[in-house]
Amino acid sequence: MSLLFIGMILDLISTYSGYFIAYSLLLKIFTTLFYVDICEKRLAFLILPIWLINNISQIQYIYYRILIDLNLYDNFFFI
């Protein structure tokens, strides 16, 4: 079971590593350009909800794919 879990994590990283790299670069640019104070740095985390909203369908796809790989999809009822 642990090997399966590690495999799923590696699959997620390889699939979405481009998104994570782009997000970290965007966060770095944002904090560098607008860094005035330690409190200002908190504004950079406003990007994360926007990123999640834009990619929610891809995140749901990963979730359902994991359920199908674990053969758990048939055991759940989705509304």
Image (cartoon, rainbow, N blue to C red):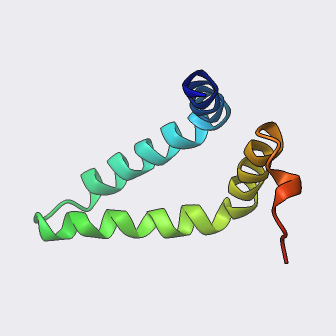
Q: Position of residue 31 (x, y in %)?
A: 28, 55
Answer above or below: position of 36 versus 24.
Answer: below
Quadrant of the image for the N terminus? Answer: top right
Q: Is residue 45 left or right of residue 60?
A: left
Work out whether 8 lies above or below 74: above
Q: Residue furthest right?
A: 74
**Figure quadrant of residue 33:** bottom left
Q: Return the x and y of residue 71 as percentages of the image width and height.
A: 83, 42
Residue at the (84%, 69%) spot, across then down: 77
**Residue 38 picture quarter:** bottom left
How many numbered marks have been drawn onto this rendered protein structure?
Answer: 0
User: Residue at coordinates 46% horizontally, 63% vertically from top-left?
Assistant: 48
Q: Is residue 13 left or right of residue 47?
A: right
Say whether residue 53 is left or right of residue 65.
left
Corner quadrant of residue 52: bottom right
Q: Residue at x 35, y 56 (%)?
A: 30
Q: Residue 79: x and y, percent?
A: 85, 78
Q: Is residue 32 above or below residue 51?
A: above
Pinpoint residue 49: horizontal percent, then vertical percent: 50, 69
In the image, what residue occupies the spot 62% across and 69% down? 53
The residue most toward the bottom is: 79
Residue found at the far left of this picture: 37
Which one is nearer the viewer's eye here, 73 or 54? 73
